[in-house]
Amino acid sequence: MTKTRLEAFSDGVLAIAITLLVIELRPPEVHQGERLADALWAQWPSYLAYLVSFLTIGVIWLNHHRIFEQVARVDGPLLLLNLHLLLWTALIPFPTAVVAEHLGGTGETAQTAAALYCGVLLLTSLAFGGLFAWITHDDRLLHRPPPAGVVRAARLRFMVGLVVYAAALALSWLSAPLALGLCGLMALYYAFDQASVPAAEPSDQQLTGPSA
Amino acid sequence: MTKTRLEAFSDGVLAIAITLLVIELRPPEVHQGERLADALWAQWPSYLAYLVSFLTIGVIWLNHHRIFEQVARVDGPLLLLNLHLLLWTALIPFPTAVVAEHLGGTGETAQTAAALYCGVLLLTSLAFGGLFAWITHDDRLLHRPPPAGVVRAARLRFMVGLVVYAAALALSWLSAPLALGLCGLMALYYAFDQASVPAAEPSDQQLTGPSA
Amino acid sequence: MTKTRLEAFSDGVLAIAITLLVIELRPPEVHQGERLADALWAQWPSYLAYLVSFLTIGVIWLNHHRIFEQVARVDGPLLLLNLHLLLWTALIPFPTAVVAEHLGGTGETAQTAAALYCGVLLLTSLAFGGLFAWITHDDRLLHRPPPAGVVRAARLRFMVGLVVYAAALALSWLSAPLALGLCGLMALYYAFDQASVPAAEPSDQQLTGPSA
Amino acid sequence: MTKTRLEAFSDGVLAIAITLLVIELRPPEVHQGERLADALWAQWPSYLAYLVSFLTIGVIWLNHHRIFEQVARVDGPLLLLNLHLLLWTALIPFPTAVVAEHLGGTGETAQTAAALYCGVLLLTSLAFGGLFAWITHDDRLLHRPPPAGVVRAARLRFMVGLVVYAAALALSWLSAPLALGLCGLMALYYAFDQASVPAAEPSDQQLTGPSA
């Protein structure tokens, strides 16, 4: 089971999930005497949900990419755990649509929508943690054993994610928009954390040897 | 006709089909005085259908991947039989949507929905069997002749699939949810069967020679 | 401008267009006292349209694939002509949806739906012919000059397509289902024509040299 | 972080966004005594919007492709700026749908629809400019320093885009269809500008060294 095709399939699912988000953005109906501009503004929860979900799936792709650079061998459990991660990630457009439709509502409706959203992100985060734990539980699947500090730092990043998504889930009952905003901040943190990675070796060299 | 582009196209179709499943999950309408949480729970057939179809297409990808590792040459019939498999696999979101909408119904409605679902999976399974039979009917398309035991075991796995999907089809008239559950168990069996495959050679080596 | 990325983008668009066809297949509404099985049968134009369009896009992929095996260099006009082909191919789900909804209608409705469908396939065929003409108008873009007989045979196949799609367009006014059926036969002819191509060289060798 | 997977993910998102445009084209409803042909003609804003958006995303892909041929190394900011470009590009189907539905309207409705469309293209253009500026701000990420004239010409092309999209945005309040037409002309200009690029080296050679 080659790593190349696993990456290609994962990239495909992630690229499709991130692009499908847009079909939840629907042209608003404009009633007699209403302005289209007002109708477009009234859809703000849709835009917020698109933005947060786009960033979240984008960051999942970045992290997936970074982890699989270290992977040299693919075994059965890795395939299943990767499929499990894709199951939750590919589901994200659904809570995104629910939030887009109900975040502007009141009381239970907005709370439940936000809780569903944060809950799916929490489960996605757990699925990613499980995949990462399997990859790093011994050195059998890796190009070379990573420095202990690197693995520890990556585990810490996963823990931060779990705690923040759980906090966002709890926050849903206080303020649905704030819960969504916290998920967005989490994605931004991961994104800028990635941005600090230095430039990789030229791609030509990566064809002849594993990247460090 | 290179194998690489055949795999890329198949991966694309499978990745899209598996990700399109989510667009059948629609935010529920919430009527006056109704709770969103209740409306979400009432959609359980959708979630079950998403889960079973995701696992099924995921397992089709895993098996497709495993078989094509052995393939060295691509001929015309192989292209057509592969397209035939994709025809049925890409159709799966349709019976999934029918089941999602009608599994909670009564009598004929739920039975027909489940029968349609199991019938499409049975035809998909037949299409995969035909592809596999062509690939292994002589050694012309393979890197090297596989041990007879391996081919026999793979044929047995296909037979199990055909029998179970036919049984699920029959079961549709007794209990539609049980029929769907049986399809889910079948996918789980294939998934864990894949998980027992040992780690492949490092991907670097696979670039220089066919995998065993 | 490398050929690899052109093929990857084209494969992506074709794989998505072929898989998007399924979202035109909607679960039928079942009214009080109606059977789901009857409602499903009543949707036969949708299934016919899915089948014909799936075959047509599948065959476009096969032919695209076969032609680009001969291509060694990609220039600007080739990029534009390829994008032009994708423009019409990616449009196919639209006339498919129109046919699915209106082929069962009467008189002008069914005729117009079939004419739209055949017209888009005719334009797709013309776009493909233009791409092919550019690729073969001199030997600059090819690995090696193909035998004159091969190019002549391929040109003949394109001409057959243009004539048949034009005939199907004219047939739309006599019988809409027959016009659709003729498009389906055309796709089948192309498909089985492809099936007669002998097995290619092992993929390992294709990495080191152009295929014949 | 390898360049190959970045290109594959970007190609995926662009291929999906360009193909998703078609699902905004819906079969028209035909009322009693109405002709399907008339109902199809009445949807002309949808076809115009499809055409302009297809060309625009196609040209984004062509330009993305051309720029990344020069890139040898991928760093963190490049990843984020690329994701930012994809965020706006993947959004294009939304203003396309708004324009398709409201361009045929009157007054504020048509103006707002066109302004939204031009505004999103302007932001997409800015995002692409940011990506390009980062890639060329020093030579660290490139295979070799490009001639100063080439970079200057490319910067000029970006400036032209910004000015034209800003002009189209302003034009929205005078004539919504003209504003859309100007965006279409811009895409055509970029497309034919690409067509003037001479044939690349044979792809076999590109595997052994960076393209010039």
Image (cartoon, coloured by chain):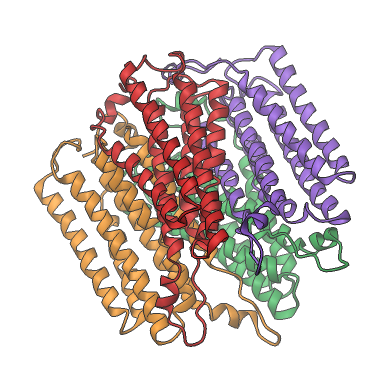
Chain colours: A purple, B green, C orange, D red
Left or right relative to B50: residue C70 = left
Where C182 sits versus C189, above or below?
below
Where B107 sits versus B36, above or below?
below
Q: Nearer the viewer, residue A114 or B74?
A: A114
x, y percent for residue A134: 70, 29
x, y percent for residue C12: 44, 46
Specify the quadrant of the image occupied by residue A86.
top right
Q: Nearer the viewer, residue D13 or A72?
A: D13
Where A147 sits versus B49, above or below?
above
> Is residue A58 something that shows in the picture?
yes
Left or right relative to C96: residue C128 = left
The N terminus of chain B lies in which quarter of the figure? top left
Identified at 14% across, 43% down, the residue is: C146
Left or right relative to D201: residue B88 = right
x, y percent for residue C112: 38, 77
Identified at 52% across, 82% down, the residue is: D31
Identified at 11% across, 45% down, the residue is: C147
Q: Nearer the viewer, residue B125 or D6?
A: D6
x, y percent for residue C117: 37, 70
The total number of labels drawn is 0
Identified at 73% across, 18% down, the residue is: A153
> Is residue B142 something that shows in the picture?
no
Please, which residue is most extreme toward the front here? D174
